[in-house]
Image: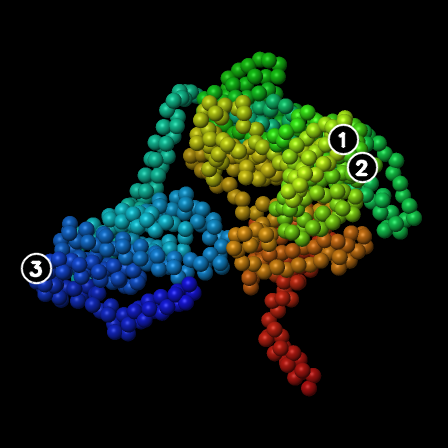
Amino acid sequence: MKSRKLLFLLIIGVVVALYFIFDLSRYFSLAVFKEQQAAIAAWHAAHPWLASASYFAIYVVVTALSLPGAVPMTLAGGAIFGLWWGTLIVSFASSIGATLAFLVARFLLRDWVTAKFGRRLQAIDAGIQREGAFYLFTLRLVPAFPFFLINLLSGLTAMKARTFYWVSQLGMLAGTVVYVNAGTQLANIDSLSGIVSPGLLFSFVLLGIFPLVAKKVVEIVHQNKVFAPWTKPQHFDRNLVVIGGGSAGLVTAYIAAAVKARVTLIEKHQMGGDCLNTGCVPSKALIRSAKFLSHVSRARELGCRSASADFSFAEVMERVQRVVRAVAPHDSVERYTGLGVEVIEGTAKMVTPWEVEVTRNSGASERLSTRSIVIAAGARPFVPPIPGIEEVGYLTSDTVWDLRELPRRLVVLGGGPIGAELTQAFARLGAGSGGKVIQVEMAPRILVREDVEVSEMVTRRFRDEGIDVLVNHKAKQFLVADGEKILIAEHEGHDVRIPFDAVLVAVGRIANLQGYGLEELGIPAERTVETNEYLQTNYPNIYAAGDVAGPYQFTHTAAHQAWYAAVNALFDPFKKFKADYSVIPWATFVEPEVARVGLNEQEAREKNIPYEVSRYDIDDLDRAIADSEAHGFIKVLTVPGKDKILGVTIVGEHAGDLLAEYVLAMKHGIGLNKILGTIHIYPTLAEANKYVAGVWKKAHAPQQLLAWVARFHAWRRG
């Protein structure tokens, strides 16, 4: 394939070189056409079909090779063939030639551009798939944009050739008619400025505005169509109703109140949602207690002969609830009422695009009218339909907090972040005493979204702490035999029997989609509520944010989406913003802690994005050594030959905190050179960020320049 490309490129290069060497462009000037107009007209009269075919072929070649001369040829087409026949020939010749140029660019350069700019090209391709035809049509209407550049650049995208052809045919038609018509008056035109006048270009700009207006009209027509079955209220009681009081709902309501909108927040269960009550807050409180116990067991590492801790699991779980209660005021009804949010405790169901029926916990019901709605209903643990699971009973990340006695033998089903965090925490608290904490994962490794070395490091730590990590084990059935609960898992084609006392299901979460009126209103929602880049559903005034919308299920991304949902819901159609997912960080709070932002090596390879790796092992860091936490690493992916950061993975103590510097750097385009030039306090773990930047700098040191500098210093020594 490479040799074919080189041969094809050579042929094109020779043709283009000959064009300029022999100054063939002089034959495509307005002056030559005017001089030869009579002779050409006579030849056309004698051989009309041959003249048309010859003109057509030359026009296609000139356009396909992106040679100068298309505008004079178009004028000549009008002079020779007249308005209608000239328009027909030029329209098809220009579209075919443009498509050939498009295909040439794709054949020669698409693979190279994909390899070099793969990540950025993916975003462009996604936009092209959504609205590429519209933007191409807009560009075709405005000849201020060089058409040959449009042809070549479009070929580097994922646009389909047939789409490019028909949009070009249609989009260039208006300009073709204008130029061909001008060509019919060729005898009266002395220069191209006569046709490309400011007035004419202004007319083309007006033509370019047309598709924007057309798009707005299409949006209005679509809105009228989707709203047609419903009667819109004459006025609204509220600007915004938010369904759900978790992270996304709370932030949405907060922003709406801050900009003085009238907003109602409806929560049927507990304010703060999963994060406060059953997710982030209680799990981190549990992990903290478990980590303290792990440090007690490591007393000798810290120079202490021995240490012990007398504790009760029930008291640890009570501490977890105290932490939840301490944080709860941040998300309370009282706080949000004080901020200006009307909070209703009850269930909500959309009955029209502008009305929400609320049944309060007291039993009273009412109907609220609102200009916009934000669905922030969150998600819940997914329980797979494994035979027997209901009979043996199970725990989830929602119900595990009710435990007050440690199970002797605990099975954790799932090797993702939630499963991994709870596995280690319960093992450290003593679950499995006399038995084992067993983590069962059907994939080849736990934490499969991370690089292999990360999974291996965490797995090794788990096994060192006595956890039985079973990967490539697919849960098939639960049963009770002789009074004992048993999980049957398939491993390498054989059934494995795993006895247990309690099973914790942590295999993921699913969006809460039932009971909110989505189906009745016809809002598409399969795994999540379907939204566009503005977080709008098929109803432009109904938005979704947080876990119910995806694509990420993190508290911080829910809050991030909430800003877009709130602002767009309150200020559209005057202004709205596309949700930005370009820099999304996350962390898994196991030990060693794992944090990441952007690409890791696994994803870069899957997406065929070229990268360089700079790695610093934290076992070399002074503060980590002093803390007896000398483990883990920082791995930074950069653009080859540049310090631009593509992604960062950190494994080690306080990885989530250390990551913040890179999140800021990626968000604002700061490279490793500037991180290297920033003072970091000694001795801190944060110095590792500077040292990994130093690894990159050393790998890109200008060796030739340094050789000359060495000679300079030798010369100065005499």
Q: At label 2, which amino acid type do we have?
A: Gly
Q: Is residue 101 left or right of residue 30?
A: right
Between marks 1 and 3 in the image, the one whose residue lies nearer the viewer: 1
Quadrant of the rendered structure where residue 515 is?
Answer: top right
Quadrant of the rendered structure where residue 286 is?
Answer: top right
Q: Quadrant of the N terminus?
A: bottom left
Dot 2 corresponds to which residue? 435
Q: Residue at x 76, y 42 (%)?
A: 467
- Which of the two residues, 609 or 709, is positioned nearer the viewer here? 609
Helix or strand or loop: what does disc 3 sit on? helix
State the separation of the CA atoms marked 2 and 1: 10 Å
Dot 3 corresponds to which residue? 45
Dot 1 corresponds to which residue? 501
Q: Is residue 335 visible?
A: no
* Residue 673 image offset from top left, x and y in percent: 61, 61
Helix or strand or loop: what does disc 1 sit on? loop
Helix or strand or loop: what does disc 2 sit on? loop
* Residue 388 image offset from top left, x and y in percent: 66, 28
How busy is the neighbourhood of tag 3: few (under 14 within 10 Å), some, or many (20 plus)?
Answer: few
State the separation of the CA atoms marked 2 and 3: 100 Å
